[in-house]
Amino acid sequence: MTQKTETRAFQAEVQEVLNLMTHSLYSNKEIFLRELISNASDACDKLRFEALADDSLLPEGGELQIEIEADEEKRLLIIRDNGIGMTEAEVIENIGTIARSGTKRFLERAQGEEGFDQNLIGQFGVGFYSAFIVADNVTLLTRRAGADPEAGVRWSSSGDGSYDIGAMDLPRAGTEIILHLKEEESEFLQSWTLRALISRYSDHIGFPIRLKELVPAEEEGGESTTSWTAVNQASALWTLPKSELSDE
């Protein structure tokens, strides 16, 4: 249940970054997935660290993971993690302002003599904004690990200078980012495209990246089903016995 929602303006520098990304990165727009997966991995890393002092913060079952699913009919792409999550104050600070996002330094570098370099995105922590290269609306649902379900937060923006934020009951901790893709970006709803991008940019991620895929019916006339498949190779290392692992 969503409670009272407030509309806030992005700080001017944040809007500059949004404009810069959508125009300068369009030719390499696929990196948005790399950036969002990287953020999800960081959230899982932070939770794993905090859980050293309090293992009750870990999700049920203890496994930290990243999930990706697409809904072609609704043009939705969802990237979900069960990592540390955020409070409402953290969402405002990390996304709506320049306090922690490194936005100001990013702009100084990107607009300086060296020009725009896509590698600056991860360096200055502004990768979240790359979602707007392919999406006309982005919704973020998040809840801090250890917080009550009613402490969930819903953030939403069309990248047009403002965002809506409010409290929302969320049954589990972590962060879910829902991208409503632009009509011309439907390729990013295809399973084979997502697999290829994960392999190219995120194969090294140490947490399982599970992709929801359609499994055709085994028999004619039968019903197809869905399954979650771990796509990245690095995550498979966690399942191997030590005897099968090399220093490499």
Image: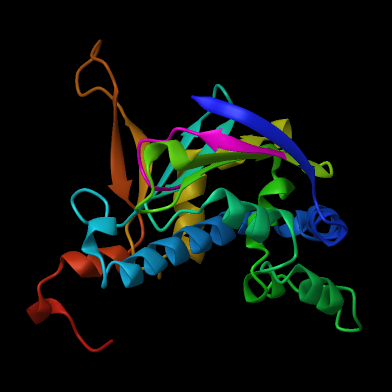
Q: Is residue 138 visible?
A: no
Q: Left of 21 or right of it: where is 224?
A: left
Q: Left of 237 or right of it: where is 113?
A: right
- Based on the displayed image, in which of its 4 quarters is residue 56 positioned? bottom left
The stretch in magenta equals 164-176
Q: Is residue 52 above or below residue 41?
A: below
Measuring from the top left, give residue 58's x and y in whole percent: 27, 57
Taking depth in this image into account, of 81 and 119 the one nearest to the observer is 81
Q: Is residue 8 above or below residue 242?
A: above
| Residue at the image point whose x is 77% and y is 42% from the top | 8
Q: What is the number of callouts on the image?
A: 0
Measuring from the top left, give residue 247's x and y in whole percent: 24, 89
The stretch drawn in magenta includes residue 237: no
Q: Left of 46 or right of it: where is 26?
A: right
| Residue at the image point whose x is 25% and y is 66% from the top | 54
- Based on the displayed image, in which of its 4 quarters is residue 248 positioned? bottom left
Taking depth in this image into account, of 179 and 162 the one nearest to the observer is 162
Taking depth in this image into account, of 220 and 49 the one nearest to the observer is 49
Scheme of colours in the image: rainbow
Measuring from the top left, give residue 214's x and y in whole percent: 35, 31
Measuring from the top left, give residue 227's x and y in whole percent: 28, 36
The stretch drawn in magenta includes residue 165: yes
Outermost residue, top side: 221
Q: Is residue 129 visible?
A: yes
| Residue at the image point whose x is 17% and y is 64% from the top | 239
